[in-house]
Image (spheres, helix red, strand yellow):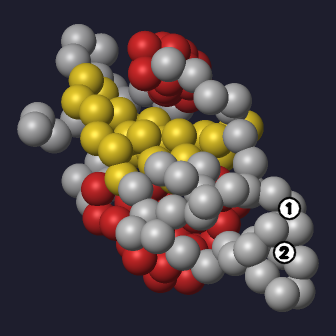
């Protein structure tokens, strides 16, 4: 796999879809938890009535998949993106420094996800000061 500068991650509790990309090329990777939830409801999964949110192996695997990426946009439809950011803040501060944003995004195709990543970073790159 070619090392790309940007990546976009779409994450929920069942999988993380990661696309590393530049203007001309992209590489996709999927990371799945070892024990994915069977059915996800706000009150499913534990005796206390809430689902288990601590998935350190899954989040560690996502962090590892982003190790060579310089800028990352994290997206997803639910709480998993915030839980991943919380995990990264505590266990992978170097990744947090490279996290350009966290946005809510419903399930999309890989092509739509790539287009969203390119749109986001094109706009973000325009706001950075230009080096002479």
Q: What element carries label 1?
A: loop
Instruction: Classify residue 107 as left or right of residue 30.
Output: right
Instruction: Classify residue 64 as left or right of residue 42.
Output: left
Vertical position of residue 105 compared to residue 94: above or below:
above
Locate residue 89, reporting x and y percent: 57, 74
Q: Distance between the residues labelled 2 and 1?
A: 6 Å
Q: Pointer 2: residues within 10 angstroms few (<14), some, or many (20+)?
A: few
Instruction: Classify residue 4 as left or right of residue 34.
Output: left
| Residue drawn 69% across the image and 29% down it | 106
When asked about the image quadrant of residue 47, the answer is: bottom right
Q: Pointer 1: residues within 10 angstroms few (<14), some, or many (20+)?
A: few
Q: From the viewer's side, name the closer residue of 115 and 14.
A: 14
Q: From the viewer's side, name the closer residue of 106 and 119.
A: 106
Instruction: Classify residue 34 as left or right of residue 90.
Output: left
**In the picture, which quadrant includes the C terminus?**
top left
Residue for badge 2: 50
Residue 70: tell me if it is visible: no
Residue for badge 1: 42
| Residue drawn 23% across the image and 35% down it | 4
Vertical position of residue 110 compared to residue 41: above or below:
above
Locate residue 39, reporting x and y percent: 68, 56
């Amino acid at each position: 796999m070619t090392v790309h500068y940007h990546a976009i991650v779409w994450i929920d509790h069942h999988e993380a879809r990661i696309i590393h990309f530049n203007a001309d090329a992209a590489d996709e990777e999927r990371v799945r938890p070892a024990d994915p939830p069977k059915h996800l409801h706000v009150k499913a999964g534990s005796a206390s009535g809430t689902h288990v949110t601590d998935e350190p192996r899954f989040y560690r695997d996502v962090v590892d998949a982003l190790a060579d990426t310089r800028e990352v946009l994290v997206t997803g439809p639910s709480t998993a993106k915030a839980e991943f950011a919380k995990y990264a803040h505590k266990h992978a501060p170097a990744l947090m420094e490279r996290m350009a944003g966290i946005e809510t995004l419903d399930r999309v195709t890989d092509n739509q996800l790539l287009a969203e990543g390119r749109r986001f970073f094109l706009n973000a790159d325009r706001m950075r000061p230009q080096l002479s």
